[in-house]
Image (spheres, helix red, strand yellow):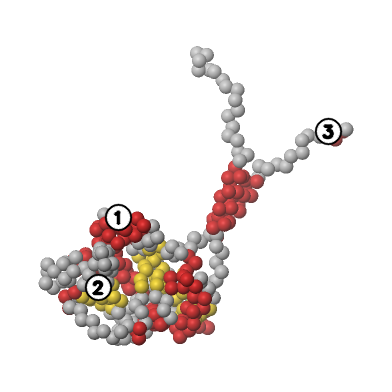
Amino acid sequence: MARNKRGNPEINSSSMADIAFLLLIFFLVTTTIANDKGLMIQLPPKPDDIENIDVKLKEKNLFKVYVNSFDKLLVEGEPMQDISQLREKVKEHVTNNGRNPEMSDSPKKAVVSFKTDRGTSYELYISVLNELQGAYYEMYAERVGVSVGAWRDLSTKLDDPENRRLYDKGRDVNANGDVMFPMNISIAEPSKIGGN
Amino acid sequence: MSKFKKKSNTSQEIPTSALPDIIFMLLFFFMVTTVMRENTINVEQRIPPATELKKLQRKSLVAHLNIGKPKPHLIPVLGAEPRIQANDVYIETDNLVKWVLEEKDQINEVERDLMTVALKVDKEVKMGLISDIQLELREANARRLLYTTILNSDE
């Protein structure tokens, strides 16, 4: 009977929040959210799988970008100091549609050829590839009327029929399934002057 | 005057008894989303920035390759030439075809062709090595490639 005189037995739980906070902070600090973001490309098939067709490209349809082992840019035969001009030049070349006789006949025929040297740094390779892909994304986004970010987003989620429709519209897929506005970025094998 | 001096006798404290629950909820969220890194990366990884990033949708279909100079404490043993690290070991370019086949084996058969190889490359690596790797990947028919980059926040 004497026992009842003691107060209600209770565990003091006010420090529970502090303990939980400590654990929370530990996990917050150790978490590294994996980032699988980057520039996506598709490699060509194996060399011996390609039939040896002599593909003849007209010189004017080619847009040549070459980077040497000193990380210097040569664009259409002229040295380029500032990489930010590249994007506009690519767009001008691809959307020429035969107006300027020295540039491409149509977006379908236009090819952007990107060649490096074995001694070129990866950092510059990525920034040039970024500009080339960016130029195409900007052209696509403009055709569809969405922002560039939205275009990149929808092009990775093609399961959605609405995205698929916009994606095909941007790339100008005609009734036969031919892509009239393909992203023709050709990454050539590097030359061996610089060595590694 | 009494209009303003009305004193309510309700308690003004905010009940904090639910606080631990809220914190626990956050805690569980982070515990579940955290992926502890399985492999130690033994090559330098200073990732170059870019702006036109695309996000991979299917994480299970990605195989990672880390490329760069060995970490400073390993240079006396391995030399300073850039190396390829796959999972936990250094591999040579000649073994890449075998590595791709092993990685493809872990993927559901119908989805094997959708496998993407993510290259995480240090910015000082030269293109010679990268193109050797790409040639091997073409040989192994792993043609979807992602250059992992970080977002350039200057623009």
* Residue A70 appears in the picture as rendered: no
> SS for tag 1?
loop
Amino acid type, callout 3: Asn
Q: Which mark is residue A4?
A: 3
Amino acid type, callout 2: Val
Instruction: Please identify, in this view, whether the residue under mark 3 or under mark 1 is nearer the observer.
Output: 1
Between the C-alphas of marks 3 and 1, the distance is 73 Å
List x then y, in percent, for residue A4: 83, 33
Between the C-alphas of marks 2 and 1, the distance is 23 Å
Say whether residue A106 is left or right of residue A29.
Answer: left
> SS for tag 2?
strand
Q: Residue at x 45, y 85 (%)?
A: B94
Q: Residues within 10 Å of mark 2 (few under 14, many from 20)?
A: many
Which chain's residue wears label 2? A
Closer to the camera, B15 or B131? B131
Q: Residue at x 21, y 65 (%)?
A: A91
Q: Is residue A8 above or below residue A124?
A: above
Which image quarter is the C terminus of chain B in? bottom left
* Residue A141 appears in the picture as rendered: yes
Q: Which mark is residue A112?
A: 2
Q: Which residue, given by chain and number where applicable, does mark 1 sit on? A: A147
